[in-house]
Image (cartoon, rainbow, N blue to C red):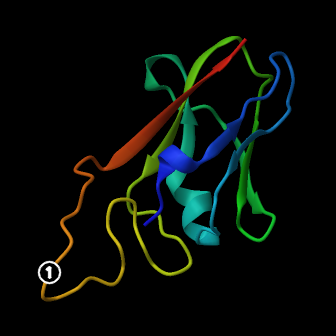
Amino acid sequence: PPDPALWKIEVPRRATHEPLAVIFPKPMDHALAQRLICVTGKGDVLVPGITSLVDEERRWTFVPAHPWARGRFQLVIQTTIEDLAGNNIGKPFEVDLVDPVQRHVINASVKLRFEIK
């Protein structure tokens, strides 16, 4: 299943509209990645902007509506996001019926923190 701990975050410079980029080791479902990943700032306030998925669904980008400010942000990923094989975070699509896999993620979302300096 997808593991956000293996995703690489490319942080933009402050006072720019440079995109935040997340590089996935394997392609993700295009429509779900567009809908189930967002950026929040101080107080978990949603940062408005435009997302895209490029490089054969391996690079998610976010361009903010306003220039990046200095501070701490979070990438919020809903655990229902899927890779191209239908695997969710913490739960593979196919499971062994004799020895079932237990879901490892209980939260509805995973948060990855990053900082704009």
Instruction: Classify residue 62 as left or right of residue 16.
Output: left
Residue, disc 1: 99
Query: In the figure, residue 96 lies in which quadrant?
Result: bottom left
Instruction: Classify residue 6 as left or right of residue 56.
Output: left
Q: Quadrant of the C terminus?
A: top right
Q: How many marks?
A: 1
Residue 116 pos. (x, y %): 70, 18
Residue 108 pos. (x, y %): 30, 50
- Residue furthest to the bottom: 97
Nearer-the-camera pick, 50 or 56: 56
Instruction: Classify residue 70 as left or right of residue 2.
Output: right
Q: Is residue 70 above or below residue 105?
A: above
Q: Secondary structure at mark 1?
A: loop
- Residue furthest to the left: 98
Residue at 42% from the left image edge and 53% from the top image edge: 78
Q: Is residue 81 above or below residue 43?
A: below
Residue at 70% from the left image edge and 11% from the top image edge: 70
Q: Amino acid at mark 1?
A: Asp
Residue at 84% from the left image edge and 16% from the top image edge: 15
Nearer-the-camera pick, 18 or 114: 114
Q: Alpha-carbon neighbours of circle 1 within 10 Å: few (<14), some, or many (≥20)?
A: few
Q: Is residue 71 above or below residue 80?
A: above
Nearer-the-camera pick, 48 or 113: 113
- Residue furthest to the front: 99
Query: In the figure, residue 90 lies in which quadrant?
Result: bottom left
Residue at 40% from the left image edge and 67% from the top image edge: 88
Residue 73 pos. (x, y %): 57, 24
Residue 56 pos. (x, y %): 77, 71
Q: Quadrant of the N terminus?
A: bottom left
